[in-house]
Image: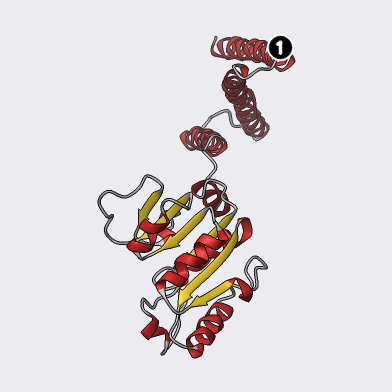
Amino acid sequence: MADNSKEEFLNLIKRVGAFLTVKISNLLRDLDSRSIGAIAGLALAVFFTWRLLTLPSGTQRRQHKSSAGATSSGSSTCTTADVTCSKVSTSSEYSGSQNAVKELFQPVKPTLGKIVRKRLNRGRKVTCQLLGVILEESSPEELQKQATVRPSVLEVLLEITKCCDLYLMERVLDDESEKKVLVALEDAGVFTSGGLVKDKVLFCGTENGRTSFVRQLEPDWHIDTNPEIVTQLARFIKYQLHISAIKPEGSASNIFTTTSLENFFGLV
C-alpha cells in the first residue's frame, strides 16, 4: 500500500510539472512586464518539482541496491543504521537545494563603480580639494613638511577618475609643497589608472584662487572642506559635497554634508 501511495504521489508531481511547463511556455510567448514576476514564481516551483522527482527516485535506487545486496547474501533484515543513513542523506540533499535557491534569488550587491556613478548622479566633471579630503594633512603649513594620501579614500578616488573628469586643487605656500603633493599622489598610484594626470592637479596661493579655479572649470560636483567656499559656489555649481563633522544650518539644497569622501559612498 505504501508503494502505491508513493507512485500516486510521484504521478501527481509529474502532472503538476507538466502543467507548469505549459504555463511557462504560454507566458514566454506573450511576455510583458507583469509576466516577469509570474515566471520567477513558476521557475521556483519547477525547480522544487524537479528536486522532488529526482531525490526520491535516487533514494529509492539506493534502497533497491541495498535490498538486492542483502537478498543475495541471504539476509532480509533492514537495519536501523541503514534507514537513518538514508534519511540523513535525503535531508542533506534537500538542505543543499534550499541553499541553492536562496543564493539564486539573493539580491546582487552593486559594485563600487556603480555606487559612485549613482551617488554622483552621473556627473561628468568633478573638482576636489586635497587637504582634509584626499590628504591626511589639513593645512598648507603641514604640506611644507610632508604630504600623505589617505589610504581609505584611494579606492573611491580611482573609481571617480574612471567615470569623471577629475581635477584636484589646493592652496600651497611654496613650490616644495607642490612637489611633495605630486610625489605622494604618484606613489599612491593615482596617476597609473589613466583617468588623472599631473596637469589636472592645480595649485594656488589663496582660498579665493581655489574658488576661481572651480568657477572656470564649471564642474557638476565640487568637494571642499571650507564652508565659506561651499556657500559662495552654491549659486554656480550644480552639486557640492561639504566634508565636515558638523552640518551647517541653512545649507542650500544642492549642498551635501558628510564626514569623509569614502563615507559619502558607503565605504565607512
- Residue at horizontal 47 percent and vertical 86 percent from the top: 177
Q: Is residue 110 above or below residue 191?
A: above
- Residue at horizontal 29 percent and vertical 61 percent from the top: 245
Colouring mode (rainbow / by chain / secondary structure / one colour): secondary structure
Q: Position of residue 190 (x, y in %)?
A: 58, 72
Tell me the kind of residue under disc 1.
Asn
- Left or right: where does residue 119 sit relative to residue 207? right
- Residue at horizontal 68 percent and vertical 32 percent from the top: 72
Q: Is residue 213 above or below residue 26?
A: below
Answer whether residue 62 is visible to the viewer in this image. Answer: yes
Q: Position of residue 18 (x, y in %)?
A: 69, 13
Disc 1 element: helix
Numbered label tally: 1
**Could you classify mark 1 by the number of other residues whose Cα lies within 10 Å: few (under 14), some (14-19), or many (20 or more)?**
few
Q: Is residue 58 above or below residue 235?
A: above
Closer to the camera in the image, 54 or 18: 18
Residue linked to disc 1: 26
Closer to the camera in the image, 76 or 239: 239
- Left or right: where does residue 242 sit relative to residue 247? right
Picture quarter with the C terminus: bottom left
Picture quarter with the N terminus: top right
- Residue at horizontal 25 percent and vertical 51 percent from the top: 249
Q: Position of residue 61 (x, y in %)?
A: 66, 29
Closer to the camera in the image, 165 or 155: 165
Closer to the camera in the image, 105 or 247: 247
Q: Is residue 163 above or below residue 86?
A: below
Q: Position of residue 89 (x, y in %)?
A: 53, 37
Answer whether residue 156 is visible to the viewer in this image. Answer: no
